Amino acid sequence: MRPNLVVPAVATALALASTVVAATSGSAAFVPANLAPITAEAARNWRPDERVRSGIDDMRAAIDANASPRTQAATDAVRLAELGHTFELRVAAMIACCTKDGVASRHLHMLLVEMADGIALMQRAAHADARRMGLLKVVQALNLYGTMFAHPGWRALDETLEVSAR
């Protein structure tokens, strides 16, 4: 049942990403009208290059090292901003890897834009809840990456985690 959710999620995210691109570039983004549907099996065969896999692994390790179950501690806004800064550098480096013209590259770019939105919330939101929402957006985008791309050793992140106030 879960693989059937990947295609609608990807289509929705693609539409959102093209809207973001159009809004930020000041011109309309070109999206072909005759895109073939992407099956979950085809998506799982996409293989990101080593730089992307390394960046994704680094982000996952940073979340594992700085997160605790939601019930243990409140989230510190400063820690979220620091973690957001770490993520910002990694996502910027991975976006630079999205130079190929292909479906996989476009989908990877879409996921990275979603992560960048979450990172912006982590760094600049006025309320702690909004900063935690930013972290959740990053975690969800990483988990979607894991369903779309062949990444050896990938494990989904627990979406009930947040950064602890150590």
Image (spheres, rainbow, N blue to C red):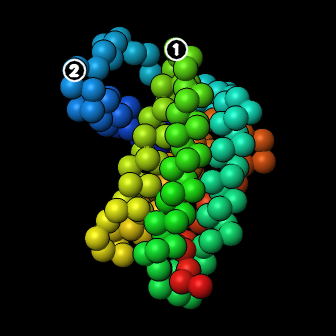
Report the amino acid beneath label 2. Ser
Q: Quadrant of the C terminus?
A: bottom right
Q: Residue at x 42, y 69 (%)?
A: 132
Residue contact at pointers 1 and 2, CB within 8 angstroms: no
Q: Residue at x 55, y 29 (%)?
A: 96
Report the amino acid beneath label 1. Asp
Q: Is residue 130 above or below residue 144?
A: below
Residue 68 placement (x, y as % from top left): 60, 78
SS class of the residue under badge 1?
A: loop
Q: Earlier in the sequence, mark 1 or mark 2?
A: 2
Q: Residue at x 36, y 75 (%)?
A: 128
Residue 119 placement (x, y as % from top left): 44, 55
Q: Residue at x 44, y 22 (%)?
A: 37
Residue 50 falls left or right of residue 104: right
Residue 101 is labelled as 1
Residue 145 falls left or right of residue 127: right
Query: Splitting the image into 4 quarters, where does residue 34 fall?
Result: top left
Q: Is residue 128 above or below residue 145?
A: below
Residue 110 is labelled as none
Residue 34 falls left or right of residue 70: left
Could one spot residue 107 in this view of the protein? yes
Q: Residues within 10 Å of mark 2 (few under 14, many from 20)?
A: few
Q: Nearer the viewer, residue 124 or 108?
A: 124
Residue 49 placement (x, y as % from top left): 70, 29
- Disc 2 marks which residue? 27
Q: Nearer the viewer, residue 57 or 15?
A: 57
Q: Nearer the viewer, mark 1 or mark 2?
A: 2
Tell me how far mark 1 sits from mark 2, CA to CA. 19 Å
SS class of the residue under badge 2?
A: loop
